[in-house]
Amino acid sequence: MIREMKGVFTTVVFSLYLSGNIFGLQGESTAQESTVFPQDWFLRDPETDKLQGLSVEKAYSLLKGRPSRTVIVAVIDTGVDFNHEDLKDVMWVNEKEIAGNGIDDDKNGYADDVYGWNFIGGMNGDVKKDTYELTREYVRLKAVYENIDEKKLSKKNKSEYEYWLLIKDRFTKYRTEKEEEYKSCSVQLSQYKSFYQNLTDAIALVKTTYQVEKISPAVIDTIRSTVPKMRFAKYILNVIYENEGKDSEVEKIAGELKFIIEHNSEVCDNYKTAIEYGYNPDFNPRTIVGDTYSDLEKRSYGNNNVKGISPVHGTHVAGIIAANRKNDIGMKGIADNVRIMALRAVPNGDERDKDIANSIFYAVDNGALVINMSFGKDYSPQKEYVDKAVKYAESKGVVLVHGAGNDDDDNDTKPSYPCRIYEDGKQATNWIEVGASSWEADSSLVAEFSNYGKKTVDVFAPGVKIYSTTPDNTYREQDGTSMASPAVAGVAALLMSYFPNLTATQVREILRQSSRKFDNLRVNKPGSTEDINFSELSISGGLVNAYEAVKLALTMKGSLIEK
């Protein structure tokens, strides 16, 4: 999640910024923002560390001396930096393929697929941005129904025509909203940049003129200059002291403002991208891939560039699951004997059903036992083909882990695709849907952005301020169910590694049944001011915990009876 600007800025009401009323934090609370905690909090133990983590190290204490097998975990995402210092030794390598010879050595339909495959690339490049599925549906239906006479429609087409009217209305509404948000964002950002420049100029001018290392109210009180620049500098600095207190450090405030501006520049860029690409009916990057998109069964398209153009998200996800636990650098992932298979299928925009389905087919056919899917969308026009892939994974005993979404929605009433429910109403037994949680066992336990669902979300897992790998040997924190999903995928892989006889369904049930419960804990319901019992937000009513999961797995003889 990223920070968004809210409200209207003027220099006179700069105090609103200081009190946090302009720069809202989407996906984070003010209390969480000010909390100091270890970067690996999501691995910590609730009892010993007082943080609602996964108890990973405690879980390994139960596994000492127990053999494990290597488990392949497929990461369907934006791409993975396979050369990262914390990932290069845990990447899956297709040993049947000779790298760089341009030949499909293993005859699996993909030439040089050493680390996985890129389903959104082609001979002449890679897709970076794509439209939203809403836009693609708008384009598809517009060609059929825009100028049609409703009175001449058959009963069969009547239903789709009504669907077209709904899509048309939503597309127009959402695009208009993004245009307004971009305009407002740009104006506000310009004003904040202007204030930041004035503030830093004022600090520099006073320090230089009065030869002081640190500015204080006492220094400002001595200014009697009639020079306009100095008078303005005094005014700007007094705004800070009047609103933040006489003991405030103006240099620190300037640094915080710079940080917020940088983050909200990204927000403005996202709005602009949404307008120029996401909601642009004339934009079609599929020509880069060069496939016949309607031919869903043809799987051998794309290229082997699994890193892609912007692999931040996928690299972060991969690190949570499997960052090297033995190299004493960076961070530790959750699972200690896994290999990451990189499958690039998620652009900046909505992923396409065909690419997701074929990524699942590829992962299963090449030995993955766990597949992480940290993405989602509101529409799934080729859902039957995705269902086919999910059923195939189910038949092969592969665990599918999916992030519930970051729109504070109830997935019981507003599905996020892909999902566990098939078109015929039956449900995949190998599917785990994950909501995001934070570190405190209080009203803020559930991340304020997280989707939820008593019938559709299985469990919650850490998804706020998760520190993990990012491209070019860097690391940073990110928020989202995109982070909670690989947390669960990592625990699932750990179970399948140390308990090879477990089925995919048993792994799901272990994670549900062993999840940590909180007796009558009232939490903030995402997207509202309502407080609700935490147990009402998911099927299990609990948080995934690796220690409890391993403890339960150790007691099992044969199959686990589903609740």
Image (cartoon, rainbow, N blue to C red):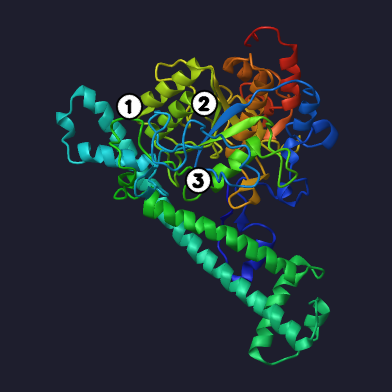
69 and 208: which is toward the camera: 69
Q: Is residue 109 visible?
A: yes
286 and 304: which is toward the camera: 304
Q: Alpha-carbon distance for marks 2 and 3? A: 35 Å
Residue labelled with disc 2:
412
Q: Alpha-carbon distance for marks 3 and 1? A: 25 Å
Furthest toward the right, the residue is 48
Q: x and y percent of residue 227 in the render?
A: 67, 92
Q: x and y percent of residue 136 in the render?
A: 33, 41
Q: Is residue 432 above or below residue 213?
A: above
Q: Is residue 192 above or below residue 158?
A: below
The kind of residue tagged 3 is: Lys
Considering only order in the chain, which callout, 3 or 2, is on the residue closer to the N terminus? 3
Residue labelled with disc 1:
297
Which SS class for mark 2? Answer: loop
* 116 displayed left or right of 526: left
Residue labelled with disc 3:
307
Considering only order in the chain, which callout, 1 or 3, is on the residue closer to the N terminus? 1
